[in-house]
Amino acid sequence: MSNYKHGIRTSRQATAISIPVTSDGCIQCVIGTAPVNLAVDPYDTVNKPFACLKKEDAVTALGYCSDFENYTLCQSIYATFNIFAVAPLILINVLDPKKHVKASVSKTYTVEGGKIVIDEEGILLDQLNIANEGGITTYKADEDYVASFTSDGTVTVSIVKTGAAKSEKSLKASFVQLDPSAVTYEDVIGSIDAVTKKKTGLELVNMVYPKYGYVPSLLLAPGWSHVPAVALALDAKASSISSLFTGKVVMDVDSAEGKADSIDKVKEFKDNNAISSRGEIVMWPMVKVGDYKLYYSAMMAANLQYLAANNNGIPSRSPSNKDAKITGLCLADGSEVLPDLDEANDYCNACGVVTAINMNGWKNWGNNTAVYPSSTDPIDRWINIVTIFDYIENNFKLTFFQDVDDLTNYRLIDEVVSGFNMQLNGLQGSDDIAGGEITFDHDENPIANILNGSIKFHTKIGGYTPAEDIHNVFEFDPTITQNALEGGGE
């Protein structure tokens, strides 16, 4: 382009704010650790669910940084808001700033330009003390100095020009830091206190719907779900959320050294760790987005929510062969993984594990839940069939919960049958299902059951399975050649 400007031109700049697309049909609930020292109130962040409609909500409530290995919730915050721009996102932090901390340390720093820089992360500002180099005089926050976080999570202490520390050439800082390594998988699994009934960890999933009105249909714990005990606990919780709803687990196969550190070891890891449920969507290995390394579960869960959000909130589409929005695959140690199509099919898809392949860009690759190959029943095997069935079942419960304890009469039965058939017809019209029908069969409702307060409906649904294997047989037809030659001679 000419340096001398004469004419007309345009330019573009990035959108300042990315507005998330909301979806109630496929909502993530993530359990893990957050840099809570960066939150507005670090001590009001532990073992409680937060519903975030935008990234700023998550940053305010729990803090955010790019140390994805230590602060696992940040992986989902990044994948959900920065990559796929969907909402809401439910976050449960189990890192306790009163419990998971390192011992207090003291260091001396030189004052430069009226400030000192504490090049450490995880510092709790309320436990930061600034004194003179000898440690004799302790200065007052906001009077003698102002401490604040930088963009990378370290701390800058600016000296107030009118404060008592204005003449100091060096200062002694004493501080306490978060210790994410002190968090254990038991903290993630959580418990219910026998006396106080207080819930922690995964047990808080049951609080999401009563508190926010969202059904947390995707449970995940990136950085933790590759631990077999956590995976089993996630699956158990997903099978009965709030004693009413059904969800799915998006989990990872451990790609660390000595585990599934090559693609041919994936099946062995899965089989040896009881990963075999229809509600489990299993991912291998880890993924890269530029310089960031994330657990695949964080990206896939956000991807599933994105697919639903862009389909009117209905999770009927398969995630396979969809843009993974990653730049590569890697093992836990960061080494590159580049599976070809046969390897992805034979070592992952064939045992119910989803991976990715580079086919003119990285694509998610795999349609099977963890139940495959033990079961080939479409209602259990296919990811998109499982998600749409769970969605329809959960919607039935949400829609007709208001009829529980109503009088068992014709009006009630007709309301359920007519109302739900309308929902099914709508899903058929949008090609989310092939068809469906709910009926009230008198043979399934003997008078004894009705008098006991129990009635049963029966719903049949036909779903669209993914076109996983498209086969076109090509053959050479000499008659076509002959006809072409004969026609050309006329």
Image (spheres, rainbow, N blue to C red):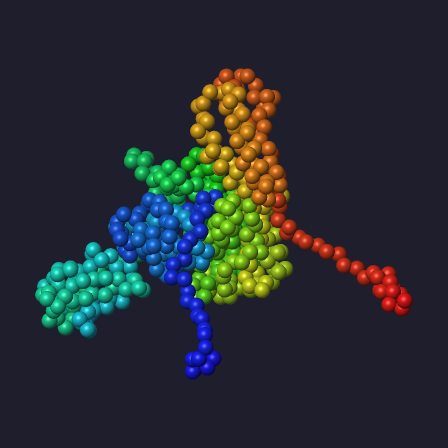
Image x and y of residue 274, in percent: 52, 46
Q: Nearer the viewer, residue 131 or 388?
A: 388
Q: Who's the residue at 58% across and 31% down the image?
A: 438
Task: Classify 126 as above or below 162.
Answer: above
Image x and y of residue 317, in percent: 56, 48
Task: Classify 302 as above or below 245.
Answer: below
Image x and y of residue 172, in percent: 17, 66
Image x and y of residue 234, in percent: 45, 44
Number of labelled discs? 0
Q: Is residue 143 visible?
A: yes
In the drawing, does residue 18 fall left or right of residue 442?
A: left
Q: Nearer the viewer, residue 223 or 81?
A: 81
Q: Who's the residue at 54% across and 36% down the image?
A: 423
Q: Nearer the viewer, residue 412 or 338?
A: 412
Q: Who's the residue at 42% across and 50% down the image?
A: 87
Q: Who's the residue at 20% across and 59% down the image?
A: 128
Residue ranking furthest to the front: 7
Q: Is residue 255 visible?
A: no
Give the position of the C terminus as an image quadrant: bottom right
In the drawing, does residue 336 fall left or right of residue 36?
A: right
Task: Classify 389 as above or below 228.
Answer: above
Q: Quadrant of residue 362?
A: bottom right
In the drawing, does residue 204 fall left or right of residue 24?
A: left
